[in-house]
Amino acid sequence: MILLIERVKDYFLEVLSWFKNPELIRPLSEEYTEVPESSDNTPKAEKFPKTLSDLLDNIEATFGTYKLKLSPNSWLSRDECIGFRKLGAHVPQRTLIPASTILAVDKKPSMFLVSSGAGHDENGSMKYLFGIKHKKLPWHVKKVDGTPYAFGMAHKYDKELFWIHGWIVITPDNKVVLCEELRYDPIRLPNGYGYMRKKMDIPELAAGLKEGEFAKDLVVKMSFTAAFNWWVGRAERWSVAVLLNGERLTFSVPKEDTKKYFANRDKSVKTATGKAKKIVHYVQEHDRAINGKSVKVKEHIRGLSVFDWNGYKCVVTAPEFQNATTIVFDIAPTLEGVDVKQFPKGYIGMSKVGHLLAQREDADALKRHTA
């Protein structure tokens, strides 16, 4: 536990250092800028595949790297963690950069799970940022009007993921507030005895930060904002979903990078009829002879968008076909204080919500493919 708290503190301090250089914080009106590749020794599977061909060449290792395993000591329930496992991690092509203003949307997503892109694999390294929408704040959290989220991180620890979180509220005027929680501080008396003093304070998620140039809650709020903004903007990007045995992993590719990401034309698969067809790839502008005339063909993407590869189902979706169910579905997926085995009649747990949301997004792509 001490190691994990130290890792959380290290992550926040690293993010805090970015704020000393405001030019690194992305304005909402701009796209992400390319982040130069580092010269570290990050394992290959930890990096975003540069092309679809790279992803397919290393599909087993990549899928295994992002596979979710639950630590029994996590602050989330088993049902909530299973819900995220069914939803699957979404992987940004570039490292998330903290944003200072949250996007105003009519429907706030019920849940999100975003890879941190940290590229580290040692004990305590942060793997994911997550959010779960709730109908109300729990009893031990200071009340704030607005839409509450359980927001936190999943850290690797002894080959498992340890999930921790605090509580954030998006207020009616679109501000982000990190809520204070009831905490117990040990007080030791001169006679050797002691007691626990109750007080409302910032959550343990941020308590390890030192007072300094920025408020303790700033990095937590801006990390939430970055993940939230990226999630609701997914409909504007290409997605490559990889599915196996009810689990999925989705890579997100900005429009401006499609030419590079789908550049390779060397991959083909056999269809049900036994005919080999090329998978989705980029075709640059060229001239084609039709009826004795030269016709200019504009650049475009063509090829199979749904195919099987070494036992994995791959679903490639263009922005104009993004159903984005997980973006617009805004019903809180969990009931505070209700045991997963005792859901009221007519309710389902978050594990089923995550499964249904992922299934709906993939179903639309599969339907287009078979139509």
Image (spheres, helix red, strand yellow):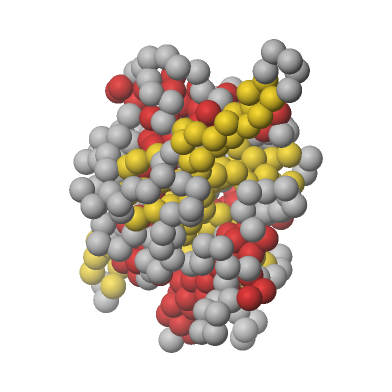
Residue at image location 34% in from the left, 48% down from the top: 144
Q: Position of residue 7 (x, y in %)?
A: 63, 28
Residue at image location 27% in from the left, 39% down from the top: 101
Residue at image location 34% in from the left, 55% down from the top: 147
Q: Position of residue 73 (x, y in %)?
A: 72, 48
Q: Position of residue 215 (x, y in %)?
A: 38, 23
> Which quadrant would the C terminus be assigned to in this image?
bottom left
Q: Is residue 180 left or right of residue 120?
A: left
| Residue 362 in view in this figure | no
Residue 190 drawn above or below residue 51: above
Frontmost residue, 312 versus 18: 18
Frontmost residue, 263 versus 75: 75
Frontmost residue, 344 versus 206: 344
Q: Position of residue 209 (x, y in %)?
A: 51, 23
Farthest right residue in view: 158
Give the number of callouts: 0
Frontmost residue, 215 versus 104: 215
Q: Quadrant of residue 222?
A: top left
> Which quadrant would the N terminus be assigned to in this image?
top right
| Residue 365 in view in this figure | yes
Q: Quadrant of residue 232?
A: bottom left
Residue at image location 31% in from the left, 66% down from the top: 320
